Amino acid sequence: MEEKKDREYFKKLAHQLMFDLSDAEADSLVKEFGTLEGQMALLDAVNTDGVEEMVYPFEAETSFIRKDEVSDVISQDEAMSNVTKKVEGHFVLPKVVK
């Protein structure tokens, strides 16, 4: 069973992501999400039988992508010089999402 996308759903989701929504913001999200679901339903209704899948959006692959060239490399010690907390050469950050 699919969960109903109402005001409480979006407020609960926001709380899990560690921020709060006002009732007006949650109502706005409910309306926006309803519009998005309607648009997705329209796309689902399009008959795509016999249509070849598009793997690449252009007829010919683009060739203007630059090659990766290593430059201005700093050492790990330099990169970690301003870090307040590190363990075994890695940054330690506070957990922000449940």
Image (spheres, helix red, strand yellow):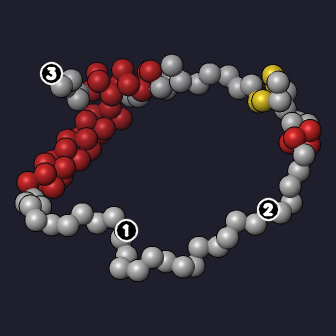
**As drawn, is 77 to the left or to the right of 2?**
right
Residue at image point 92% right, 38% down: 77
- Quarter in which the N terminus is drawn: top left
Q: Which mark is residue 84?
A: none
Evaluate whether residue 19 shows in this view: yes
> Gap between marks 2 and 3, in whole Å?
51 Å
Query: What is the crowding at mark 3: few (fewer than 14 residues within 10 Å), some, or many (at least 20)?
Result: few
Label 1: few (<14), some (14–19) or many (≥20) C-alpha neighbours in 10 Å: few
Q: Amino acid at mark 1?
A: Tyr
Kindly state the secondary structure of the residue where label 2 is placed. loop
Q: Is residue 23 visible?
A: no
Please, what secondary structure does the residue beneath circle 1 have?
loop
Query: Could you say which is closer to the camera, residue 25 or residue 67?
Result: 67
Whether residue 14 is situated above or below residue 69 in the rendered picture:
above
Q: CA distance from mark 1 to mark 2?
A: 28 Å
Name the foreground residue: 36 vs 91. Answer: 91
Spot occupied by residue 89 in the image (x, y as percentages of width and height): 83, 29
For marks 2 and 3, the one nearer the N-term is 3
Q: Secondary structure at mark 3?
A: loop
Which disc number belongs to residue 56? 1
**Point 38% across, 25% down: residue:** 13
In the image, 53: left or right of 12? left
Where residue 70 appears, x then y in whole percent? 79, 62
Residue occupying the point 21% across, 23% down: 3
